[in-house]
Image (tube, rainbow, N blue to C red):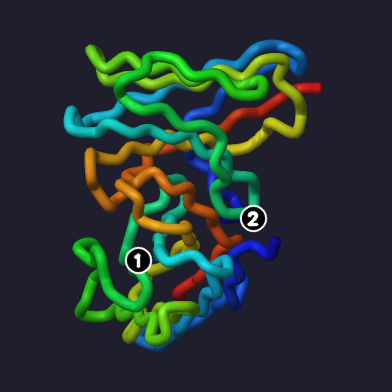
């Protein structure tokens, strides 16, 4: 079974530029998550989709971050404009269903973003 | 992700020994707990979970202990192997909650 796919794996940009990350979840998984992992810390949830609807985006900095999952399958996370503090690994995860929160999350390899 | 463990607490054990990784959680309303393993350049991988109505759960070479009184969670790895070297995160979730909250992580280094 194919895992969660993410691209690109690495991205280097200058501050104030824009960047987009792409995620393709495991086939059939209804729930998709985007996490931000700053060096030396645990992942922090940015946004969670169930199918194409947003379940939780309370920690998404909406002035500069946006995400969409238009067809309920793959998803794009965008940062515009980027700041130095956005340097982190951006992880995408998917799970079969919300199911009271016990459905296992499968993570992709992440996109490492460096903002100069 | 890469270099995820650079500034994390580190536990160093000899191959074959048992490892114990500890985690303190803060939310009394959390009732579901998960341990993840993260190797360099990869996303976190599920190891084992436990609900709050249990105080112990065993898997293959791993055991999770939960002490709700002091809000403490531990992961025990038996006969630690070099392949166990990674960063380990505990995570918590509230009843009916959607959000998984990750702890700070511990880097496990296994000496051959």
Q: Disc 1, disc 2: CB below 8 Å?
A: no
Nearer the observer: mark 1 or 2; the answer is: 2
- Residue B37 numbered tag: none
Q: Position of residue B45 (x, y in %)?
A: 57, 45
Count of numbered circles in the view: 2
Mark 1 crowdedness (10 Å alpha carbons): few <14, some 14-19, many ≥20: few
Q: Position of residue B87 (x, y in %)?
A: 56, 38
As helix, strand or loop, the secondary structure at mark 2 comes to: loop
> Mark 1 and mark 2, same subunit?
no
In the displayed structure, B108 sits above or below A114; it is above
- The chain letter under disc 1 is A
Q: Is residue A83 visible from the viewing direction of this image?
A: yes
Task: Determine the residue positioned at 44% across, 15% down.
Answer: B56
Quarter assignment of residue B72: top left
In the displayed structure, A41 sits above or below B12; it is below
In the displayed structure, B107 sits above or below A34; it is above
Please name the residue that numbered disc 2 is placed on. Answer: B41
Q: Position of residue A32 (x, y in %)?
A: 42, 66
Task: Determine the residue positioned at 42% across, 85% down.
Answer: A71
Along the viewing direction, whichever of B78 and A3 lies nearer the viewer: A3
Please name the residue that numbered disc 1 is placed on. Answer: A85
Quarter assignment of residue A72: bottom left
Marks 1 and 2 sit apart, C-alpha to C-alpha, by 20 Å
Q: In the image, B68: left or right of B39? A: left
Q: Is residue A78 visible from the viewing direction of this image?
A: no
- The chain letter under disc 2 is B
Q: Position of residue A108 (x, y in %)?
A: 57, 61
Along the viewing direction, whichever of B47 and A81 lies nearer the viewer: B47
Task: Determine the residue positioned at 34% across, 68% down.
Answer: A50
As helix, strand or loop, the secondary structure at mark 1 comes to: helix
Task: Determine the residue positioned at 27% across, 80% down.
Answer: A64
């Amino acid at each position: 079974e194919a895992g969660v796919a993410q691209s690109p794996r690495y991205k280097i940009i200058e501050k104030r530029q824009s960047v987009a990350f792409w995620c393709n979840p495991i086939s059939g998984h209804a729930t998709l998550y985007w996490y931000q992992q700053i060096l030396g810390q645990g992942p922090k949830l940015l946004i969670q989709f169930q199918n194409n609807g947003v379940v939780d985006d309370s920690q998404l900095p909406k002035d500069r971050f946006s995400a969409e999952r238009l067809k309920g399958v793959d998803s794009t996370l965008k940062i515009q404009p980027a700041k130095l503090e956005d340097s982190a690994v951006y992880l995408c995860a998917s799970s079969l269903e919300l199911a009271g929160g016990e459905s296992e999350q499968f993570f992709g390899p992440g996109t490492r973003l460096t903002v100069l | 992700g890469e270099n995820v463990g650079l500034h994390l607490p580190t536990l160093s054990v000899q191959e074959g020994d048992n490892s114990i990784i500890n985690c303190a959680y803060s939310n009394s309303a959390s009732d579901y707990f998960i341990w993840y393993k993260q190797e360099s350049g990869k996303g976190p991988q599920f190891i084992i979970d436990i609900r709050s109505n249990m105080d112990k759960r065993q898997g293959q070479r791993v055991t999770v202990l939960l002490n709700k009184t002091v809000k403490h969670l531990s992961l025990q790895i038996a006969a630690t192997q070099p392949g166990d070297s990674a960063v380990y995160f505990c995570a918590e979730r509230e009843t009916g909650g959607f959000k998984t909250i990750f702890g700070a992580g511990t880097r496990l280094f296994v000496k051959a």
